[in-house]
Amino acid sequence: MIKLDQFLKLMGVAPSGGQAKLMIVDGDVKVNGTVEIRRGRKLVSGDQVTVEGQTFEVGDLNSK
């Protein structure tokens, strides 16, 4: 599992943890089609995260 804010940093969507937090609390991030405002939301393989019209799928985190 990975936290939502960490995932945004890993994918290069947010340059810092602070920026990721702002994006999340401002309602700019969707997880599986639903706005998510909890930066600590734990993501699992197969979850889809949408930010600014781009969708990223959480892959197999165990292989990294």
Image (tube, rainbow, N blue to C red):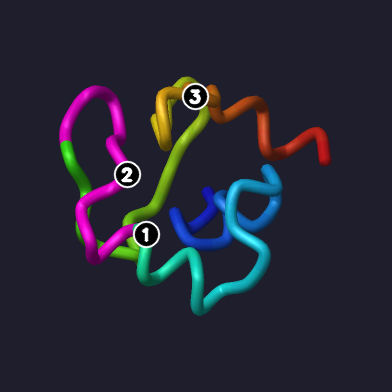
SS category of the residue bearing label 2? strand
SS category of the residue bearing label 3? strand
Q: Residue at x 54, y 25 (%)?
A: 56
- Point out which mark residue 23 bears: 1
Q: Above or below — where is 26 with respect to 31?
A: below
- Point out which mark residue 54 bears: 3
- Between residue 4 and residue 63, name the one nearer to us: 4
Dot 2 corresponds to which residue? 29
Give the Cα separation between the discs numbered 1 and 3.
Answer: 14 Å
In the image, 62: left or right of 23?
A: right
Residue 5, given in percent of the width and then of the height, sits at: 48, 61
Q: Residue at x 56, y 51 (%)?
A: 8
Q: Residue at x 39, y 30 (%)?
A: 50
- Between residue 31 and residue 15, name the one nearer to us: 15
- Between residue 61 and residue 50, name the one nearer to us: 50
In the image, 44: left or right of 17?
A: left
Mark 3 residue type: Gln
Q: Residue at x 28, y 36 (%)?
A: 30
